[in-house]
Image: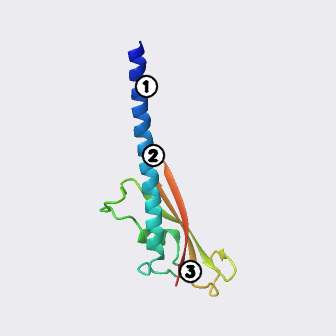
Amino acid sequence: MLLGLGVVAVLGAILTLVSTSARHRELSDAATLVATTGERLTSRDTPLLACGAATPAAYSSLVQPDPDDEVVDVDGAVVTVEAVQFWDGSSFAGCGGPDVLRAQKLTVRVQVGSADERLDVVKWA
């Protein structure tokens, strides 16, 4: 009886270890991907899109993760730009016409398994 309880306790501990390890991996992958995506969006290599063309889908298509990345497991990762807002001189808002200055706030979202990370970045001309 005592041996049976010991076996159950050890198996429970191993299951908890595996479960928390997998969760930690998802969280660290999501954090790395959201930071990498933010860096790619603010890079000069990623163009600043004009007011009418600067949609979340347009920016999302520019920053999809590299499937050959050896640092982060991107299988099953969902990377999206959720929102694009424009600086009008006093705040970020929707596309307000020709007076919009050349700065955009982009909201990035990364989902890896049950991990969900968001990041706001500002892209300048």
Residue kind at label 1, given as amino acid type: Ala
Nearer to us in this view, 101 or 14: 14
Name the front one of labels 1 and 3. 1
Give the labeled residue for mark 3.
Answer: 51
CA–CA distance between discs 1 and 3?
60 Å
Point 70% across, 80% down: residue: 90
Nearer to us in this view, 84 or 18: 18
Image position of 102 with respect to 64: above or below: below
* In contact (CB < 8 Å): disc 3 and disc 2: no
Q: Position of residue 27 (x, y in %)?
A: 47, 52
Give the labeled residue for mark 2.
Answer: 23
Outermost residue on the right side: it is: 90
Secondary structure under tag 2 reads: helix
Name the front one of labels 2 and 1. 1
Name the front one of labels 3 and 2. 2
Give the labeled residue for mark 1.
Answer: 9
